[in-house]
Structure formats: structure tokens, C-alpha cells
Image (cartoon, rainbow, N blue to C red):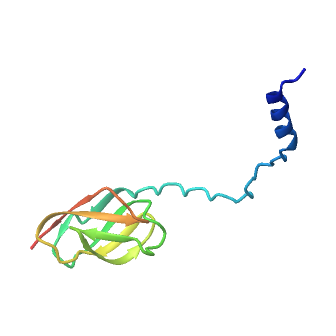
């Protein structure tokens, strides 16, 4: 024999409509872009010179075209003469005399610094 609490619970369960869980539509999730690889092993030639010197930085991973990529000398933007994936020719901007770092920024990722010595 069924007690009244069991009978009430059975009636509630029997009268409860079935619930189908909502499944969101399949929306494609874009994969995260692989992290950018920084330009590597830059070497500047000549290694010293005054403002206005045309110098070349050789390395790898600079990108085939300059686009929005930049090169800085002592923190100042340098004018690019030519740009390729392995070599960038640039003009040394007006920066203080002495040792400075040359850095290539490709897609927001900086290369390790290459030394250059600005002479008078």
C-alpha cells in the first residue's frame, strides 16, 4: 500500500512535463592565432657610424614586406630603405652619440636588440 506522501510525489512526477535541455547552436569558435615568433639573431653592419648612416640589419623572421612593422635605433624610429625577411636597410636617425640598441618590431613582437654605436 502506498502512503499519501509517496502518492503525492508520484502524482507530481507524473504531471511534470518533460524538459528538453536547450543545446546552443553550433557556433564555430575561431582558433587563436599562433603566437608571433620574434625576429631572431639581428646583426647590424656597419656596427658604428654617425647620424644619417645607411646600415643593414641581417637576421630572420622580419617578414617579406614592411607593412606596419618598424625598426628603432636608440628608441627612435628609423627610415627604412629596403625590407625583406632576412635583411633591412635603414638610415640611422638623430639619436645621442654612443652605444644604442637596434630593434625590429614585427607584428608587435620585438627582436632581441642588436648593438650599434652612434659616432659624432
Looking at the rendering, which quadrant does residue 25 occupy? Answer: bottom right
Residue drawn 43% across the image and 74% down it: 66
Q: Position of residue 26 (x, y in %)?
A: 74, 57
Q: Position of residue 37 (x, y in %)?
A: 45, 55
Considering every residue shown, the one lying at the far top of the view is 1
Q: In which quarter of the image is the N terminus?
A: top right
Quick check: 3 above or below 116? above
Q: In which quarter of the image is the C terminus?
A: bottom left
Residue 10 appears at what percent x and percent y?
85, 33
Which image quadrant for residue 43? bottom left
Q: Is residue 57 above or below residue 3?
A: below
Considering depth in this image, is 74 or 14 the residue closer to the camera?
14
Q: Is residue 105 left or right of residue 16?
A: left
Q: Position of residue 87 (x, y in %)?
A: 39, 66
Task: Depth check: give the residue in front, 74 or 59.
Answer: 74
Work out whether 102 lies above or below 35.
below
Q: Is residue 93 left or right of residue 17?
A: left
- Between residues 117 and 13, which one lies in front from this camera angle? 13
Q: Which residue lies furthest to the right in this view?
A: 1
Amino acid at each position: 500500500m502506498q502512503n499519501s506522501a509517496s502518492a503525492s510525489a508520484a502524482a507530481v512526477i507524473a504531471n511534470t512535463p518533460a524538459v528538453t535541455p536547450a543545446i546552443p547552436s553550433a557556433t564555430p569558435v575561431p582558433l587563436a592565432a599562433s603566437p608571433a615568433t620574434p625576429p631572431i639573431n639581428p646583426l647590424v653592419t656597419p656596427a658604428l657610424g654617425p647620424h644619417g648612416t645607411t646600415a643593414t640589419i641581417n637576421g630572420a623572421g622580419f617578414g617579406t614586406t614592411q607593412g606596419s612593422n618598424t625598426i628603432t635605433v636608440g628608441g627612435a624610429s628609423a627610415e627604412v630603405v629596403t625590407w625583406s625577411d632576412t635583411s633591412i636597410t635603414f638610415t640611422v636617425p638623430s639619436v645621442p652619440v654612443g652605444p644604442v640598441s637596434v630593434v625590429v618590431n614585427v607584428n608587435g613582437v620585438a627582436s632581441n636588440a642588436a648593438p650599434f654605436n652612434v659616432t659624432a
